[in-house]
Amino acid sequence: MLRLLRIENFALIERLEILFQPGLNVLTGETGAGKSIILDALDTALGGTARALRSGSERGLVEAVFLLNEELQAWLNQEGIDPLEEGLVCSRELLLREGDGKLTSRSRVNGVLVNKTQMLNLRSKLVEITAQGQTVQIQSPQTQRRWLDDFGGEALLGKRAEVSQLYQTWHHLKAEIESRQQDQQLRLQRLDMLEFQAQELTALRLEDPEELGKLERERDRLAHSVELQKQSYEAHQLLYQNDSGSPAIADLLGQAERLLQEMAQVDPDLTPLAEMVSSALIQVEEAGRELIRYGETLEADPSRLNKIERRLAQLKQACRKYGPTLAQVIAHAERVQAELAQIQGDGTNLEQLQAQLDKAFQKLEHHCQALSQLRQQAARQLEKALIQELQPLGMSAVQFQVQIQTGSPTAEGWDQVSFWISPNPGEPLQPLASIASGGEMSRFLLALKAVFSRIDPVATMVFDEIDTGVSGKVAQAIATKLHSIAQDHQILCVTHQPLIAALADHHMRVHKIVQRKRTSVRVDPLGEEERREELAQLTAGHSAQEAMTFVEALLKQAAQLRKQQLASPA
């Protein structure tokens, strides 16, 4: 329940504190007195659109104080916010930003900064504001379906949440299939290219990254085999055995070895030199013998040479395509095989996904059907409850029907909901938006709120000129309905109707004053005599004796209605 509203430097208000009580709180005043500013301030404190500051001010504040209950205490615990002795305090600081002069704001709950999402979540637990603009909202099929679902309660809302989850699953599968179908051509092209490369590289039998160098060396040896045989023979002649009659290097080293050995016998210091020459002789002789063996291995082998040339051509072409080195070609071949395996075994194929999609759609349809049945049940109950609420509001012959048509599944189910009404006898049912006058729409909205007040945990309900377009008996019926709702809820009502104001448990007058050449809005709680004066002003615009007589009759009638409601609260 709202206990207190503090307002500083907001629109036409310089500074104001308004105390609210349980029951029906009525705000009256002349047109333009500032009644809507009070409700705007409450809306702003609870996360609504930030309104203008008072002219000449750089900072404003709106603060609403509520009594705590178990649900609000649980919300504070969840958000890690400590309770206050004063209750639950929702405040909004309004500031002009330096530089561009734009209006900014900060919201707090019990002094703790909160974001807009948190504040709007809390707001839904604190107040429900019904304004004239909602007569436009109620014409929306989406709004009508949402209200029907809320009326259906936890079972219906739970089923709707289940349908929403199933729809998301189905939609995700559908999007995945469409994406795969769009990518299938590119995927097949990629698969063809990888299969071609894999086949080509596998045929090369690549294993040794040094194969190219080895083959090039063997090719060079085979291509110059005759020349190498001749040169190896000549080198053998020079080193080991010279058939021309000239001494070979081995012969000369042998002579030098013998000479040094003789000299070492006389001078032992020459022994190391003699050993060096002996070692050189051994190496020269070994080299000569190796040259003979090397020359014997050299043969002109055109077949082998051709084979090597073909292999080198294959490897070099692979290096040009996938290299540049053979080691890089081998690494590319390994990557091709890995990607090919991934694409070929890439999860579930389209046929399997389509089967999953069909199954998901069947499940979605099944739960949409169950949701639709719950909505049908809720619709019959809502029809009965609304007719009961509308009949006392001057619509005794009203007919009301919730029509539900099936369409394509969505996250909200497959039902299209529309409210149809016939307010007058003999008239056919038509969509609410097509036939309802302003007064009829106001009464319908009030009846709807009365129905929801039985199940709505929100303690405070705000009605902004819900009596627009009505008078006489209808206004009296609206007054009675508001007072009835106020038995279980705190009601804040802005009205111009004396019939409604007369039933108020607490009556406040909104008016403007001029101080220091500045206009400001004031709100005064009214005592008995002041209330009579205000009701007279609402009745006739002055406090003439005739108006006061009518006011006395209103108050007497209001007292009788209170007694009747106390005796029969339903």
Image: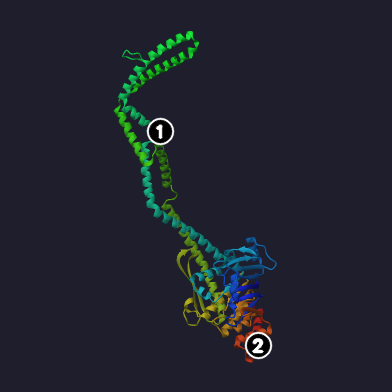
Q: How is the image coloured?
A: rainbow
Determine the secondary structure under disc 1: loop
Name the foreground residue: 382 vs 312: 312
Quarter of the image that includes the N terminus:
bottom right
Considering only order in the chain, which callout, 2 or 1, is on the residue closer to the N terminus? Answer: 1
Closer to us: 202 or 96: 96
Please name the residue that numbered disc 2 is placed on.
Answer: 552
**Residue positioned most to the left:** 302
Q: Is residue 570 above or below residue 177?
A: below
Instruction: Compare residues 388 and 529 and report the one nearer the observer.
Output: 529
Residue type, mark 1 in image: Glu
Q: Can residue 108 be seen in this snapshot?
A: yes
| Side of 190 where 77 appears, left or right | right
Quadrant containing the C terminus in the rendered view: bottom right
Whole-angstrom CA distance, mark 1 to mark 2, is 115 Å
In this rendering, is residue 277 above or below 490? above
Residue closest to the eye, 177 or 66: 66
Q: Nearer the viewer, mark 1 or mark 2?
A: 1
Q: Residue 492 location in percent, x, y?
A: 62, 76
Tell me which amino acid carries mark 2: Glu
Residue at 31 percent of width and 21 percent of height: 230
Q: Residue at x 46, y 64 (%)?
A: 409
